[in-house]
Image: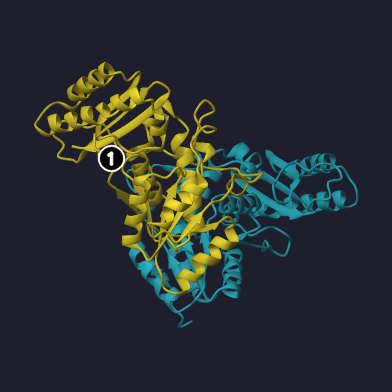
Chain colours: A cyan, B yellow
């Protein structure tokens, strides 16, 4: 591709580029990522390109959403590879701030999301969504996009970001993009790179189990019973521990109640060795 | 005045008005208030008008910055009087959202400021700055102004808002405006309306005492000793209790250290009967 990607590393350069696009009457989509880009991210970029004239992809491995025992240090990083991938899919600029730019000395502001952030991921990662909401609010303020695109793969994150934008009246639209999967159903994830061949063989059972939950609930099964069955299935396949399999309201993530007539979502998280996988499907 | 003020009560109307101004290439200043407008507020509007072509004044008595025992219910409200005052000073629109618009069912997001929010007001009002930062972030997202004007009268609030805007990269500039005072030095405040004639006579001693602290520190006195003297003076004048008199770094509000060469600020809060007064001056 001759279409080189511009890597922007200072806020001054970013704001100048955005102002130039605005002056030309162009709309802007933001795709926030932590790099280690795969086909799932590229689908987000393509969706942003459908919605807006310009697409900015941010690449920042955000330390505040990792707990001390988590994989911040070993999280995969491949800047050159990321930029090469972005060149092929209509991305106009990569926004690559460093840690000192995002969290300078004296940084002292947190966003604390409740509601959709309660339970599920927060049960094992209590500070995760605070870190995500805060860094996304910063990225939205830096780029000032018309839309920001997030994958449904991280479904609770998508709900929390929608809630944050709604509650703080941030002037942009959040767009969710369907999960991209391998042929056997495994959701694409940068963390799949951690899996051994044997774990990779087992991994698709997570998606199969929650797909069975969705089918069962759709045909009248009690959500709690279907979810319990899936937890057994996933554990038997070799996941340990199974953090959760839950059926929730698709918008608020409140626990599913019988006969509500609301849209529902099945969400799950479980471990294969040292790697934690998550997935979700619509009922 | 024939220059009538437009009262806007829906987000759709607000965004349409702002978009029309933007389309015409006009800049916008926001002056956030809780109504009960006095000459101090009008000075903020005039300053906004110097900086921008359009000025929006928001009027919203924000419940989340009052504790249950505080004066939310009896806080002075005078919508017709406020609109009449704004008509004379170059305000283009009054943004008057109701509580349901600002905090609908399901609202679940808080901004938690630390740093400049630590101590001083927070010692007696621990949730105050969280409420202020959250509602201001909402107002900034709703109005999307180029600048927002805040009075130095609420100096810690000004510092916390600057910190919030900086930390979250919100795309606007915060402008501080000097405190407007009565002839005897009392800082204008909506809460001065609560004072009895006798309390009103005593009230200016708060400003006199902190002005003496500033003069003493400027000429070499130890900040802690000068502040202690002022606490005694204020108590002797009839204030009870004296919540604090402190000398702080003028930007970070960190406690003043000896021989720092940094700008300093003297801040105080004390009660006259059931009314709490605050004031501050530069060293």
- Residue at the spot 20% in from the left edge and 20% down from the top edge: B229
Classify mark 1: residues with Cα within 10 Å, few (<14), some (14-19) or many (20+).
some
**What's the residue at 48%, 33% (across, down)?**
B127
Image mark 1: chain: B
In the depicted view, which residue is nearer to us: B113 or A2?
A: B113
User: Is residue A75 visible from the viewing direction of this image?
Assistant: no
Q: Is residue B68 left or right of residue B259?
A: right
Horizontally, residue B205 falls left or right of residue A187, namely left
Front in this rendered view, residue B151 or A111: B151
Residue A109's place in the image compared with A208, above or below, is above
The quarter of the image holding the C terminus of chain B is top left
| Relative image position of residue A89 (x, y in whole percent) | 55, 75
| Residue A175 place in picture, x, y as percent | 62, 63
How far across and how far down the image is residue B51, in percent? 32, 61
> In front here: B204 or A68?
B204
Q: Quadrant of residue B183?
A: top left
**Residue B251 location, quadrant:** top left
Q: Position of residue A127 (x, y in %)?
A: 53, 40
Q: As rendered, which of B247 and B100 lies closer to the eye?
A: B100
What secondary structure is marked by label 1? Answer: loop
Q: Which residue is mark 1?
A: B181
For this orientation, the residue located farthest to the left is B219
Whether A106 is drawn above or below B259: the answer is: below
Q: Residue furthest bottom?
A: A2
């Amino acid at each position: 591709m001759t279409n080189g990607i511009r890597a922007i590393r200072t806020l001054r350069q970013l704001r100048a580029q955005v102002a130039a696009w605005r002056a030309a009457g162009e709309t802007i989509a933001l795709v926030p990522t932590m790099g280690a880009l795969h086909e799932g991210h590229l689908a987000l970029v393509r969706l942003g390109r459908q919605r807006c004239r310009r697409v900015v992809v941010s690449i920042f491995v955000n330390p505040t959403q990792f707990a001390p025992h988590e994989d911040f240090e070993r999280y995969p990083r491949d800047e050159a590879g990321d930029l090469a991938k972005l060149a092929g899919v209509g991305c106009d600029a990569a926004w690559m701030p460093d840690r000192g730019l995002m969290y300078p000395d004296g940084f002292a502001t947190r966003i604390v999301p409740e509601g959709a952030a309660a339970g599920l991921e927060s049960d094992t990662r209590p500070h995760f969504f605070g870190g995500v909401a805060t860094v996304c609010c910063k990225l939205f303020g830096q780029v000032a996009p018309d839309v920001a695109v997030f994958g449904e793969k991280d479904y609770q994150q998508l709900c929390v970001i929608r809630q944050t934008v709604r509650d703080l009246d941030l002037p942009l639209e959040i767009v969710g993009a369907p999960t991209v999967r391998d042929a056997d159903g495994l959701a694409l994830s940068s963390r799949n790179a951690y899996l051994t061949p044997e774990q990779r063989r087992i991994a698709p059972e997570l998606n199969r189990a929650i797909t069975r939950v969705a089918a069962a609930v759709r045909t009248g099964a009690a959500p709690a019973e279907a979810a319990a069955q899936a937890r057994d299935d996933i554990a038997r396949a070799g996941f340990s521990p199974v953090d959760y399999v839950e059926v929730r309201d698709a918008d608020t993530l409140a626990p599913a109640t019988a006969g509500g007539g609301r849209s529902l979502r099945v969400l799950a998280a479980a471990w294969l060795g040292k790697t934690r996988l998550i997935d979700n499907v619509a009922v």
